[in-house]
Image (tube, rainbow, N blue to C red):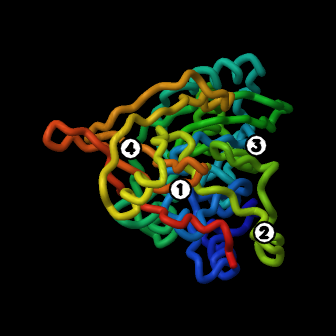
Amino acid sequence: MKPSGMTSRDLVNIAARRVRPHKAGHSGTLDPLAEGVLVLGVGRASRLTSFVQNYPKQYLASFRLGAESESGDLEQPLSEYPDDPVPALESLVAAAKSLTGEVVQVPSAYSAIWIDGKRACDRIRNGEQVDVPSRKVQVYDFKIVKYDYPNVELDITCGSGTYVRSLGVDLAASVGAHAVMTHLVRTRVGPFHASDAISIDQVRHDDLEPFVQPARLGVEHLPHLAVNDEDALRLINGLNVFGTAHYTPIDPLTGVAGPIKSSVPTDEGIAAAIRTDGRLIAIVRGKTKEYDPSWYPERVFPLEPRSLS
């Protein structure tokens, strides 16, 4: 669990010192004032962080109505709006419903979004003028879990790239008010839950071996291509394999798997090649070469070491 007041990079640096000579990387930045689940990839699994970022994420966010700041949170000074209306709970619930589904939002200029090779928050802190473009994001669920004016607590499940503080500000704007985020906790990233996370003190001092999870957890949302030992060896050596990948669509809100579907090799499709013992062997991409569709390795994990020793 990343604590408030620490950057995501700070936590990765602490973990990296503990797992040397293995590499470490994180999948999805949390702002310094936010806390919660930060999934770290260790060793070869650090090359899976981009896939973990595609998992739905769940947050508990607290906002204060009748105030705002340039950053959308408590990082910048507050402006008070005592004449703002006091919205009814029903109005907030209706506004949250309207912000569910595919939503167009404009992240704060103090966000960690990359603009021309540099984070927007770094640019604005250096005195630059920053125009953050709008983006389409997916909001799967948006609930008002507690409301005691001026404080409102939100439970949000959303897709990658969603800025929760912008959602809270947009929620208030929908009822003619202002809002500032006062607290943010990320409670889930796909199959990785806060209840399974470890503290920063444990990262610093405890034996980390018992907390290492199989790399395949980072790609459970991809189609899985079952491979035997012979095909696994082919992939490890850069050769193609044949077969049909299977996947079970997982509801991002409930986590319940749907019916099994199939995925044949195409030039756009990727899959996770899983050996019969459950180990991730490779990320493979389908190719239709000479009318002979097959899977070719893009990222190979021949050993997938589970030990940090």
- For label 4, the SS is strand
Judging depth in this view, the residue of 17 and 109 nearest the camera is 17
- Name the residue at the left extreme: 290
- Residue 260, above or below 150: above
CB of mark 1 within 8 Å of CB of mark 3? no
In the image, which is nearer the foreground, mark 2 or mark 4?
4
Q: Which residue is mark 3?
A: 62
For label 1, the crowd category at 10 Å Cα-Cα, with few meaning under 14, some 14 to 19 and many 20 or more, is: some
Closer to the chain start, of discs 3 and 4, is 3
- For label 1, the SS is loop
Tell me the quarter of the picture where residue 198 sits.
bottom right
Name the kind of residue labelled 2 in the image: Ile
| C-alpha gap between disc 4 and disc 1 | 31 Å
Closer to the chain start, of discs 2 and 4, is 2
- For label 3, the SS is strand
CB of mark 2 within 8 Å of CB of mark 1? no
Name the kind of residue labelled 4 in the image: Ile
In the image, which is nearer the foreground, mark 4 or mark 1?
4
Q: Which residue is mark 4?
A: 270
Q: Which residue is mark 1?
A: 111
User: Quarter of the image containing the N terminus?
Assistant: bottom right
In the image, which is nearer the foreground, mark 2 or mark 1?
2
Q: Which residue is mark 2?
A: 200
Q: Position of residue 217 (x, y in %)?
A: 61, 49
| C-alpha gap between disc 3 and disc 4 | 38 Å
